Image (cartoon, rainbow, N blue to C red):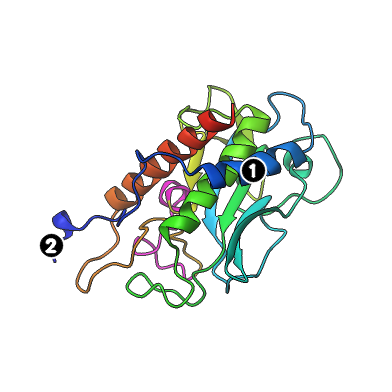
Amino acid sequence: MNVMSFNPLGKFDPSAAVDAAVVAKAKAVLTSLPAVPAGLLTRLYLHWTVAPFGCTFGDYNGEADFEKGIWQMIVTHDPRDNAPGLTHNPEASHTWHRNTGAVGVSIAGMNGATQHDFGPDAVTVTGLEHLCACAAAFATAYGIDALGTVQTGTTHQGDNGPVNTAGEHTILTHAECASIDGYLCGYTSDPDCRWDLGSLVALPSGVSLTKDMVSRCGDALRQRVHAYKAALT
C-alpha cells in the first residue's frame, strides 16, 4: 500500500454521533473529579499504557480501561497533584517534561505492540471513544478547550523545565509531544522513543509512521474530545 493512500484513523470517525452510554460514564467521572483553581490545569496529553488490559497506572490521571469485557473510565491519580503549587505530592508523570499544569489520560492496551502489529490488546474504536470521553470529563472540569491553543506565556516545569508551550494545541497525543520534543519513534536513535496514538491502526507492510499521520490522528482525537465535551455541558 502507498503511504499516501493509508488512513491512520482506520474506522475511527471523529464526526460520528457520540455514544450516549459512553457519555453517561464520562458524566460519572466528571462528578468525581476534585475542584482545582481556574487556570492551574491548562493542557491535556493522550497516551496508551503499553500494558495488558486491566492494568492501571498512577503515571496517568485518568484511564480508559477494558476489564472483564467492559470498557470503563477510572481516575488513577489525583489531578490536583499536577496543578502547580497546589499540593506537595508527586505529580502523575505521564509526559516527559510536560507534567506540571497538565492532565494525562491513557487508554489501556498495546502490550508488546509494534507499529505493524498492535497485538492482542490493540486499541479499538470503542476504546478510543472511552478515551476521548474520559479526556472530555477532565477538560470540562478544568476548563481546557479541546480545540484551543496554549496562550502566550504559559510554561510548565518538569525534567528540563520551564519550557514554553505557547501556541501548541491544548490537547496533544504523546506522539505529537514526541514529535515536538525530538523523540518520536522513527525520527530518533533514542530507544526510549514514543509513538502513542500516532496511528490508530497498525501500519501495513512497507508503510512507515510519518509526522503527517501523527498530526491527522491528533486532530481527529481533539475533534472527538470536543464532541464529548459538548455532550457533557
Give the main secondary structure, helix, strand or loop, of the magenta stretch. loop
Residue 154 as seen in the image, left or right of residue 112: right
Give the SS element for disc 1.
Answer: strand
Residue at the image point whose x is 64% and y is 43% from the top: 103
Q: Going by the picture, which residue comes out furthest to the front?
A: 20
Give the SS element for disc 2.
Answer: loop
Residue 150 versus residue 180: which sits nearer the camera?
A: 150
Magenta span contains residue 18: no
97 above or below 55? above
Disc number for residue 52 = none
Circle 1 Cα neighbour tier, 10 Å, few/some/many (<14 / 14–19 / ≥20): many
Residue 135 as seen in the image, left or right of residue 82: left
Residue 83, image x, y percentages: 74, 37
Magenta span contains residue 184: yes
Residue at the image point whose x is 33% and y is 67% from the top: 202
Residue 133 as seen in the image, left or right of residue 91: left
Quadrant where the image shows the N terminus: bottom left
Residue 144, image x, y percentages: 58, 30
Q: Tell me if residue 96 can be seen.
A: no
Residue occupied by mark 1: 103
Residue occupied by mark 2: 2
Highlighted range, magenta: 176-191
Residue 52, image x, y percentages: 57, 74
